[in-house]
Image (cartoon, grey):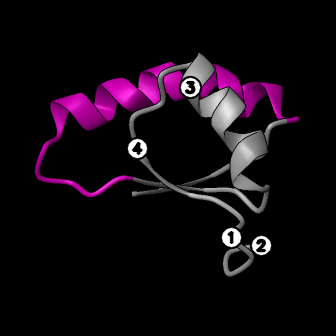
Amino acid sequence: MLNLWFTGCGPCRAEMPELSTWKDEMSDVMFFSSTYEAPEIARQVLDKVNFNWIALVNDTQFK
């Protein structure tokens, strides 16, 4: 499962707790989140909402 987001997207941040629940419930699925933003910027949001997916930061491949 791949989730694309950026820190300025309110709906992106709002869905993160629910998506983290999905990850907890589906242990056989690999979950990745991708953002083009720098790690230090992305980490502020990821830590605040306790997003537990594998974070691909500074990622320009999916943009």
Q: Callout 1 environment at 10 Å: few (<14), some (14 to 19), or many (20+)?
A: some
Q: Is residue 43 above or below residue 36?
A: above
Mark 2–mark 3 distance (CA, rounded to whole Å): 23 Å
Q: Name the residue under label 2.
A: 63
Q: Callout 3 environment at 10 Å: few (<14), some (14 to 19), or many (20+)?
A: few
Q: What residue type is labelled 2?
A: Lys
Q: What is the magenta range?
A: 8-31
Q: In this view, does 61 lie above or below 5?
A: below
Query: Label 2's element?
Result: loop
Q: Which mark is residue 9?
A: none
Name the residue: 64% across, 59% down: 57
Q: Callout 4 environment at 10 Å: few (<14), some (14 to 19), or many (20+)?
A: many
Name the residue: 77% across, 72% down: 63
Which is nearer the N-term, disc 2 or disc 4? 4
Q: Nearer the viewer, mark 2 or mark 4?
A: 4
Which is nearer the N-term, disc 1 or disc 4? 4
Q: Mark 1 points at which residue?
A: 59
Q: Mark 3 points at which residue?
A: 47
Mark 4–mark 3 distance (CA, rounded to whole Å): 11 Å
Give yes or no for contact between labels 2 and 1 (Cβ–Cβ under 8 Å).
yes
Q: Mark 4 points at which residue?
A: 53
Q: What residue type is labelled 1?
A: Asp
Name the residue: 88% across, 35% down: 8
Which is nearer the N-term, disc 4 or disc 3? 3
Q: Nearer the viewer, mark 4 or mark 3?
A: 3
The x, y position of residue 34, in whole percent, is 60, 58
Comparing 53 with 21, the one in front is 53
